[in-house]
Image: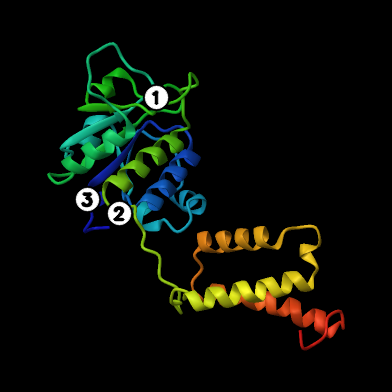
Amino acid sequence: MTSSRLARVVVVLFEPQDPVNIAATVRAMANMGVGQLRLVRPVAHDPNLIEIVAHDTRPIVERIRQADDIDAALADCVDVIGYTARRRAAKRIVLSPREAAERAMARAQDGPVALVFGREDHGLPNAVLDRAHAIATVPTTEHASLNLAQAVLLALYEIHLAAGDGTRTLAPPRHAAPPATAEQYERLFADGERALRALDFFKTRYPEHVLRTLRSLVHRAAPDARELTLVRAMAIEVLRTLQRAAIIPRDE
């Protein structure tokens, strides 16, 4: 995280009233790779309980800073974005969460960037919004008030993507299979047809139509060689089961 622009993102909670929301904020930060949390006049809370709610987040909990006023919390930040559900009459730069994330990542090259969230009951007061260089509003229905931790998670999700750290490369399969060949496809279709005929599947259906649909379905699925072999093995096992039950002769 230290090599990422995410390391310069600072989450600031102004007068949070519920320790559970502090814990949920910590968890959201851990999910999205952000490690700095500052609390301005927070409710009394036990760091140990915060970590119990937000599992495996001790590095973040240990670094939580508390401030007596908003100016102290923002003193070293080169950009401040306040998140609010209400658009004030004063002329401000108003951004969507995605636009705010792009701005934050651009400014993070120069120093710490603060994302400020307000109290659970009334959000950010005008005196705090006056310190914001821009404000961000999450598009919602008329029911605009979000849970504090939910708002933080939405904001940090966009930050995470904008930082370029949102794409996680999944490890390839341990035994990567090659693509299936035309010959393997035809073996599957041949054994599939044999199994369907043994089951008398074509008794009330047109074989040509069914088999053409089967081909189309398998080609759209684009199985690799291992997957195609597995499906073919299913068809062969149908035939063997019918043979063992003496429903069809063994040489069919």
**Residue contact at pointers 3 and 1, CB within 8 angstroms:** no
Q: Amino acid at mark 2?
A: Asp
Q: Amino acid at mark 1?
A: Gly
- Pick the residue in front: 98 or 174: 174
* Residue 244, above or below 178: below
Residue 231 visible in the current orientation: no
- Pick the residue in front: 9 or 176: 176
Mark 1 neighbour class, 10 Å CA radius: few under 14, some 14 to 19, many 20 or more: many
Q: Label 3 vs label 1: CA separation? A: 27 Å
Q: Earlier in the sequence, mark 3 or mark 2?
A: 3
Image mark for residue 59: none
**Residue for badge 2:** 165
Number of callouts: 3
Residue with the most extreme bottom position: 251
Picture quarter with the N terminus: bottom left
Res. 97 image quadrant: top left
Image mark for residue 123: 1
**Residue for badge 3:** 5
Q: Label 1 vs label 2: CA separation? A: 29 Å
Image point (23%, 58%), residue name: 2
| Residue 38 screen position, x and y as percent | 31, 41
